[in-house]
Image (cartoon, rainbow, N blue to C red):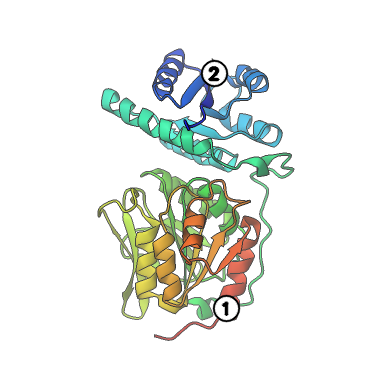
């Protein structure tokens, strides 16, 4: 039985880019470009008229930018959106804002070696359009709170000194930037050290970490080799590097290396979680969030087998229920939780289990 055709609307203010994207997407027999639009106002009319399955959206446009459009679109017509962004610093910053506003994923426009870069970009875009077509964005419907509304902070009675032997490892992919933001911005400062792998290219991970740092009580930064995993700090794996947690004397540190891709990813959740299982063991907590594929399932299982407590995001609140399902199916997940409760679950788990002395 042939796969259903994915109907795509392209919104971009450049006629040339619209033509390139339309031709590149239409080269896949399972994708049909039903319309293109030069701005979000024409795009809005096309959405109402055609009800596409997926939208590709430029975010730097005249009249109304893509961020404001997403903030207005998603509560009324929640549709999977793949952002087409630039690699400039401003482009990275507003791409993260677009993900916060409801975009499912993004691809970057090539800046060098345009011919080869364009072919690679189109291959990535076709893949991400297909993933986006399966995404669950229904939770944006009639959303009353702004994506910038301050999160409700959770209370923790634990002192920082009581958390120094514990490590929380979080892994995510498609839909994960917003899921991670919702969790981290709810957590109190007095939490064990947190290490995160979010599938994301170089540059964007630093922008993501910096933005999280602005909104969170914990300190958030892009990780570097030698960074100490410690209470009150969140370390985000840098794009295009594998990140591990290693023991150095009586403390845990970060090791970043180029390494091979694992499960097609660098950074890989499996690499991080396997290192946590090996070096932290029962002092750890593993969280697997929304994402396509199976990365993190085996690593989370290794953590659970080493005595760690493990949590998987539920299907209803996952944008893509791939990674949490894969982990659940092999017995890696101890408990399943909706996204809005995961921060409280983490606080409860870390407050009620004493660290194992090693």
Give me the residue at 46% from left, 63% from top.
Answer: 330
Can you tell which quarter of the image residue 64 is in? Answer: top right
- Closer-to-camera residue (24/157): 24
Give me the residue at 66% from left, 69% from top.
Answer: 155
- Closer-to-camera residue (169/210): 169
Give me the residue at 65% from left, 35% from top.
Answer: 78
Q: Is residue 165 visible?
A: no
Q: Is residue 116 visible?
A: yes
Give me the residue at 39% from left, 55% from top.
Answer: 237
Can you say whether 68 is above or below 310 in the image? above
Give the side of residue 36 with respect to residue 149, left or right.
left
Mark 2, Cα crowd under 10 Å, few <14 / some 14-19 / many 20+, is some
Q: Position of residue 23 (x, y in %)?
A: 41, 18
Residue for badge 1: 159
Can you tell which quarter of the image residue 250 is in? Answer: bottom left
Q: Position of residue 285 (x, y in %)?
A: 49, 70
CA–CA distance between discs 1 and 2? 57 Å
Frontmost of labels 1 and 2 is 2
Mark 1, Cα crowd under 10 Å, few <14 / some 14-19 / many 20+, is some
Tag shown at residue 34: 2
Q: Position of residue 305 (x, y in %)?
A: 43, 74
Can you say whether 76 is above or below 266 in the image? above
């Amino acid at each position: 039985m042939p796969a259903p055709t994915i109907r795509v609307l392209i919104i971009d203010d450049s006629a040339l880019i619209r033509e390139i994207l339309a031709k590149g997407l239409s080269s896949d027999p399972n994708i049909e470009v039903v319309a293109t639009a030069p701005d979000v106002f024409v795009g809005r009319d096309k959405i109402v008229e055609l009800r596409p399955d997926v939208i590709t959206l430029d975010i730097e446009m005249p009249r109304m930018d893509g961020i404001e459009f997403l903030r207005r679109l998603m509560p009324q017509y929640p549709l999977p959106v793949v952002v087409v962004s630039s690699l400039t610093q401003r482009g990275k910053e507003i791409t993260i804002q677009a993900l916060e506003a409801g975009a499912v994923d993004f691809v970057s426009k090539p800046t060098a070696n345009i011919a080869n870069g364009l072919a690679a970009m189109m291959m990535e875009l076709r893949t991400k359009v297909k993933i986006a077509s399966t995404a669950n964005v229904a939770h944006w419907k009639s959303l009353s709170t702004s994506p910038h509304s301050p999160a409700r902070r959770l209370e923790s009675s634990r002192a920082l000194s009581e958390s120094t032997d514990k490590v929380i490892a979080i892994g995510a992919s498609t839909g994960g930037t917003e899921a991670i933001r919702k969790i981290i911005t709810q957590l109190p400062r007095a939490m064990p050290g947190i290490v995160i792998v979010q599938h994301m290219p170089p540059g964007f991970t630093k922008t993501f970490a910096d933005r999280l740092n602005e909104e969170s009580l914990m300190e958030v930064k892009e990780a570097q080799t030698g960074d100490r995993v410690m209470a009150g700090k969140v370390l985000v794996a840098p794009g295009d590097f594998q990140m591990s947690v290693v023991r150095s004397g009586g403390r845990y540190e970060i090791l970043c290396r180029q390494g091979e891709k694992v499960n097609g990813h660098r950074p890989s959740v499996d690499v991080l979680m396997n290192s946590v299982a090996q070096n932290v063991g029962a002092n750890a907590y593993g969280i697997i969030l929304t994402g396509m594929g199976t990365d993190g399932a085996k690593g989370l299982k290794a953590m659970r087998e080493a005595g760690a407590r493990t949590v998987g995001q539920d299907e209803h609140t996952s944008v893509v229920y791939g990674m949490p399902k894969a982990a659940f199916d092999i017995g890696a997940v101890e408990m399943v939780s909706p996204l809005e409760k995961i921060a409280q679950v983490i606080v409860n788990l870390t407050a009620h289990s004493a660290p194992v002395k090693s």
